[in-house]
Image: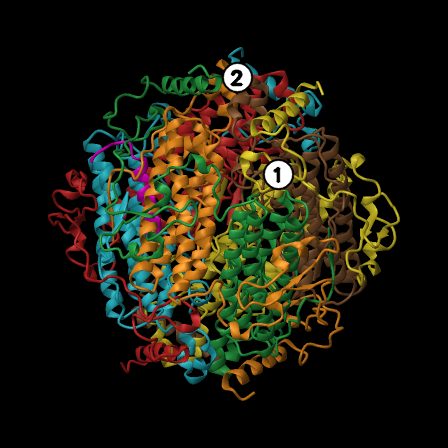
Chain colours: A brown, B yellow, C green, D orange, E cyan, F red
Amino acid sequence: MYRHVKNLQFESKPQKPDAVLAMKMQELVAGQFGEMTVMMQYLFQGWNCRIPGKYKDMILDIGTEEIGHVEMLSTMIARLLEGAPNETTEKAAAANPVLGAVLGGMNPQHAIVSGGGALPFNSQGVPWNTGYIVASGNLLTDFRSNVHAEAQSRLQTSRIYNMTDDPGVRDMLKFNLARDTFHQQQWLLGIEQLQEDGLADLIEDSNFENEDKIQDHTYWVFDETSAGPEGRWARGMTLVDEQEILVQNPPVPSEDTALLPPPDPKLYATYDGSQGRGKPGTATGATAQGIANVVKKVTGTD
Amino acid sequence: MYRHVKNLQFESKPQKPDAVLAMKMQELVAGQFGEMTVMMQYLFQGWNCRIPGKYKDMILDIGTEEIGHVEMLSTMIARLLEGAPNETTEKAAAANPVLGAVLGGMNPQHAIVSGGGALPFNSQGVPWNTGYIVASGNLLTDFRSNVHAEAQSRLQTSRIYNMTDDPGVRDMLKFNLARDTFHQQQWLLGIEQLQEDGLADLIEDSNFENEDKIQDHTYWVFDETSAGPEGRWARGMTLVDEQEILVQNPPVPSEDTALLPPPDPKLYATYDGSQGRGKPGTATGATAQGIANVVKKVTGTD
Amino acid sequence: MYRHVKNLQFESKPQKPDAVLAMKMQELVAGQFGEMTVMMQYLFQGWNCRIPGKYKDMILDIGTEEIGHVEMLSTMIARLLEGAPNETTEKAAAANPVLGAVLGGMNPQHAIVSGGGALPFNSQGVPWNTGYIVASGNLLTDFRSNVHAEAQSRLQTSRIYNMTDDPGVRDMLKFNLARDTFHQQQWLLGIEQLQEDGLADLIEDSNFENEDKIQDHTYWVFDETSAGPEGRWARGMTLVDEQEILVQNPPVPSEDTALLPPPDPKLYATYDGSQGRGKPGTATGATAQGIANVVKKVTGTD
Amino acid sequence: MYRHVKNLQFESKPQKPDAVLAMKMQELVAGQFGEMTVMMQYLFQGWNCRIPGKYKDMILDIGTEEIGHVEMLSTMIARLLEGAPNETTEKAAAANPVLGAVLGGMNPQHAIVSGGGALPFNSQGVPWNTGYIVASGNLLTDFRSNVHAEAQSRLQTSRIYNMTDDPGVRDMLKFNLARDTFHQQQWLLGIEQLQEDGLADLIEDSNFENEDKIQDHTYWVFDETSAGPEGRWARGMTLVDEQEILVQNPPVPSEDTALLPPPDPKLYATYDGSQGRGKPGTATGATAQGIANVVKKVTGTD
Amino acid sequence: MYRHVKNLQFESKPQKPDAVLAMKMQELVAGQFGEMTVMMQYLFQGWNCRIPGKYKDMILDIGTEEIGHVEMLSTMIARLLEGAPNETTEKAAAANPVLGAVLGGMNPQHAIVSGGGALPFNSQGVPWNTGYIVASGNLLTDFRSNVHAEAQSRLQTSRIYNMTDDPGVRDMLKFNLARDTFHQQQWLLGIEQLQEDGLADLIEDSNFENEDKIQDHTYWVFDETSAGPEGRWARGMTLVDEQEILVQNPPVPSEDTALLPPPDPKLYATYDGSQGRGKPGTATGATAQGIANVVKKVTGTD
Amino acid sequence: MYRHVKNLQFESKPQKPDAVLAMKMQELVAGQFGEMTVMMQYLFQGWNCRIPGKYKDMILDIGTEEIGHVEMLSTMIARLLEGAPNETTEKAAAANPVLGAVLGGMNPQHAIVSGGGALPFNSQGVPWNTGYIVASGNLLTDFRSNVHAEAQSRLQTSRIYNMTDDPGVRDMLKFNLARDTFHQQQWLLGIEQLQEDGLADLIEDSNFENEDKIQDHTYWVFDETSAGPEGRWARGMTLVDEQEILVQNPPVPSEDTALLPPPDPKLYATYDGSQGRGKPGTATGATAQGIANVVKKVTGTD
């Protein structure tokens, strides 16, 4: 259950309105790496977490903090839109061409759709969607996702920091930059903790015993002039399992030339008969064969 | 420029068709962490990379490899769909109820849309989109994204590995598991190399000098009973800048209660006048004020 | 700022796992009218609300409650997925065909993607997106949206209630049904309050003085045999402005046959010259004319 | 079946072209609350309506009218784009900086994609999708949706009305404003009619007998300083069932702390064993248990 | 303007309900090539068409017909869903396992969301969107799009025809197959007419005089063992401009190795300095240089 | 399997940076008809192709070429963004208003998201998705799709060609125009080859024997004043099967007025009882009836 406190985590007051900056800051609210992404990602990870105590609580602590970050940024955007032009854009431009240039970048949906408030869209008006987030149940892979999200989010915050001189906006972004610095480390430390607690290795390695034991330490070169093998990733030992990295150059493919079996005629896939007739020649038959295969598998009679 | 070789990187031959498994394997082709994601993510990162030589070449080597992985998986799916039921699903079910159960999971678009071939959609039929990928120009943040993508991808591959006993499918998945093991390390080693070459720190820290110097080492607790502070992320020193991590409990918010300024009347945002009249009271005026603010800022006369 | 309390608003414990029901309940988490929709809709409305006090606080009270509803439902789904089949679906089906039928409906992403937890997708695996929500700044229109969202949400909850006999699931749904009953009324009462406070009319009527004074009380009939005019909506007085509703039958269109002006030749729109030459005949000229029109408008010299 | 009449319902002739306004008006064609939304929403509701006569016919009358509204708006946009700049934007800007400012807002897809015609996208270029619409089969909930759509649509029309002085555009928008005024009332009157005919109550209340009888008249407060309880929604009687509204402050949660059961080991969800071993300890076993539960339920032997 | 006629273009009555078929037929309503696609594609093409008379009228005749096809298919789906299971799926499965198998394929949204009516989604529940359609203003390219849409639509209809024995469904599909046969030819004949009227060539060839005069008749081979050059497309004369097709094997790339210029330092793109310093070395400078370039271009002083 | 060659297929060097053009050229990378579309469409078609030899190889030759086209265009965009403004847009605008106008059109995501590189989005920032592509297994229908994609792509390239005078950009676009000219013909020649090889007719005609034999040569008129019947599509013989085209004017609909059966009461679809009671009157009964229908069908006892 959640509770609300009116006061923001950090103040969110621009010195002056700036509708163009408001448009850009939508990327930090609802872009691929906006605050909505980390908020919803951490909340789902926390709700799905199966370890009571420090892990689940930490994930939800940060997820809860991020709700407040969306609030902070949305408040900032609404304030940046104070007095934002609506009806008289053209007249303003006529009065002062410099302005026209700047006003050109205002997002019209800030007037038409949200009436001067923040939108749940990115800087180009694209709706946020949950295809951006992940909660896999596996904390190592999810912490890796979280490090990446915080890193990309911080980079975008930093780029936008450079786009304004407004001291109020910059103060809030200084706060956000610092939180992203801390949160990047928090998730890296989370990975350390998982390893210390014996809950994960450095990398995701489930079914480790079943994977191909050559391909897990081989670098393939796909460009004749590639300098790729010069990097650390192709020289020295692997980080897990300590094996000398191999370089496969040129790449040697398999014998499988990807020819496909004859199609079910009733699907009207174009076919010249070169792979033989459909087994055993009719759609019904092909289906029956497919079914028989499955039956054998299911009943274990194969 | 790219060239094609008919032979697959690894063979992609199931022992027997299995339309239900084909449906599940669509997740590995075109899900959030399918091969299309890493393929397009690495290609765009490579094309956008500004360092000639080992970095750019390595990124494109792997990106090129991944095109072949989409090809391998698509070929596998088309083969798993051999003899897949079309017209006579119901009759098959009548003949053998066990089968009916299994057949229930077939994706109808494998018949209706692709005619027995792979689809560019995930296991639930959702189209792949470029909102899944990132190429920021910053190699540290992008390598962090790549580690996460490989980790999530490997986890999903591993879960699907457990869903089949087909030795042909398993052979290919063993190959894929191993590549994901290697690629996770490759990107981690890439981060090591960036640090060795002086091109990045452990975390994204641009504008480091401007960030808040308390908030970059403070853990905030948002749940009274949180065990979050027990973890390594709230105890000991930060990884960069070596500072003792602080714990802020309870969270102390700012004085800013997020009240918004009066709206432009012409936007018809509901308002009770409690924040004063719009400045200076009409839409045109409010706009003019907003414009004047921007003009001063632009011309530096403020 | 938000805070978290570990205890759920209402308990969320199924008597027994049920993976098929878990799939259906995703609609209530992240469908068009799932809890994520009301949660994000109310939060954005509250953050954008320009009236301090009872309106803003009420909107945020409910928005905060809804975060907890997503948590309750996600917890329920994770519990319904306990022991959900992964590797051995086919064997289970072989052992008991009845089950196979039921199991057929499990969402494979509950295993592959979320590892047994809730997904931020609807019952068909479609990601949730912010195209579902609205925060217009105008409380009347937004309260109308909120009534609709609660009504649709309750209807879907009620339909799913009928799909299960599990007493634990039903208990939670009884709670949810009641909240949706209350919240529907809350938003209707909110509209009453807005009217009482002089902040809105029964309907959205900005620019009322400018609208066409016949078309605001005319019912048009577009089907010769339509019984539409028999309803209250075509008989008696309008609700606002008290006018006798007119019926226009048959519909009498304007004289405008929608012919388009000649195209800019450089856009290669197919054109037969029948509307005259492009003004004044070349792309540059057409552009210049377009520009001149705008200039005159902007500078007021027209 | 549908028929076409060349003449528009109302004329759609701007006095002068205006490419920037054309961009903004895309919101009215294909935004979340554009005419495509009401058109497709009403058509699907009408086609799915199970009451022959006045309800079905009224819904389809309006749905058919809305097809013509998309046509009107698309025609307007194509006319506003007459002579819209293509090749020589930069030169035009050089000749007259004021213009440059205004031209900056032109949507490049109006040239590149549609060749000077209307696009099926919103003002920011986002494609329209059917996630915006609903046809639930339940007329009360759908009429609630229709009121909301007309209200939001009218508000956006009204905001855009203020953005132009073009008398031709304004004439058409006056017509549209009036239709939205009438249609808001039409759906409200539809709800009156449903109640009069005994087909619905004021709110959606299916399974009314099963819902929690306290929670259906309780307002929960989630912010210590909330003024929410001052509003009509928290004082007095409910609209249905006439009960005194209760206020729950502070919120008292359940005893359920949302702990999750142990995971299936084969899903590799991170887990510390604190909730006991997986039942009965292996993936196969956990699956078998899950299946057994379902079997009992299905066969009624539980 | 549009009008409605209650009677369907063709009758739409299944002999018996079939919820699984209803799910599949959603592809024909709202899939990538469903009737919504051709309906909206033709309507936008017609509204945007700049030739009064036979072209515009023909496009709108067919577009109007297609509205009625969505209606026919939606009606069919609602009828196929008559008596579709809701509450008692599991009990039905227990009573008859064969059925369970078939029922497994029912789309739960047909109960939860649409209450037994058609959905505006495809067979996998994915919403329809306007990214599927095109109206370019150029009739040749749009007629090519229309041929493709009718061909894909007919193929999918034909595949679904094979999936049912229901005589009522088959009768409607026979009608649809025939319309798709006619419409494919209609658009091909439209291309003939465009050529006859001198409004288009066989292919889109605007700016023909500017295109590379070797690359317009060269086949490039990108696979050493490609049999591609054996086909008509690589042998003989081109269809337009009558030139002997050349085969370029092996492909000879340019000298351009795609190195990128140095980045603006303030964007934090990773860079090793190997391409020189940013011009002239600072972000402000780089920006100024970029601006100067544009200024020269705009003012023609370069 | 794929390999990479560093050198581009054609050089991709603008004379000068131009951030506004970069924004427009995103349409050619990742718009509906951008190079990503043909690249992924041809690759999936090739991988799914069931005819070894010239067809499969040709499709993959072109698909492989298209990967290189995305690379060329992405490289061009990164170069056009050299020195693109980041931090000091406003100052630049103040210094030179002309520029401000031009700069207004820059896509902020080129700074915020990609750090000066190409984005995988269209010119309006909309992510590319696989709903744009098709690979049906049927070569005739897919070649029709390919002709359409090349035609639309060429038209958009040609429009953008007119938007710039930069000789370097124009050189690359001349190359692209020529490839689109050739590729349009390639797919038309592919259709000729399919017919020559007996693998397809002029149009998609599977289940030809089952289609309605009147409707396959009838033009329906849906507008009383339609000039549609004047065109070749309504006069003369059909292209296949050589029949005189009939004109149906006015359209004569069926007797079916689209009334729907009574709903399952448990779905709460609004209903007045006019179609009789639900069969046989209860939800369970209606479900049982539906099930019985399916059972008879499956077991052939009907």
- Say whether residue D258 is magenta: no
Please state the horizontal and vertical placement of residue B157, each as a whole percent of the image.
Answer: 58, 62
Q: CA distance from mark 2 to mark 1?
A: 29 Å
Disc assigned to residue F265 = none
Chain bearing tag 1 is: F
Q: Name the residue carrying label 2.
A: D97
Mark 1: few/some/many CA within 10 Å (<14, 14-19, 20+): many
Please state the horizontal and vertical placement of residue E280, each as a whole percent of the image.
Answer: 69, 20
- Say whether residue E43 is magenta: yes
Mark 2: few/some/many CA within 10 Å (<14, 14-19, 20+): many
Which residue is at 59% across, 22% downward? A99
Report whether B289 appears left or right of C220: right
Instruction: Out of B128 and E272, give the one closest to the viewer.
Output: B128
Above or below, B36 against F263 in this view is above
Please state the horizontal and vertical placement of residue C159, each as a whole percent of the image.
Answer: 48, 69
Q: Is residue B184 visible?
A: no
- The secondary structure type at the circle numbered 2 is helix
Q: Mostly what secondary structure, the magenta segment?
A: helix
Both marks 2 and 1 on one chain = no
Q: Amino acid at mark 1?
A: Val
Q: Name the residue carrying label 1.
A: F113
Which dot, 2 or 1, sits closer to the camera? 2
Q: Which residues are magenta?
A: E35-53
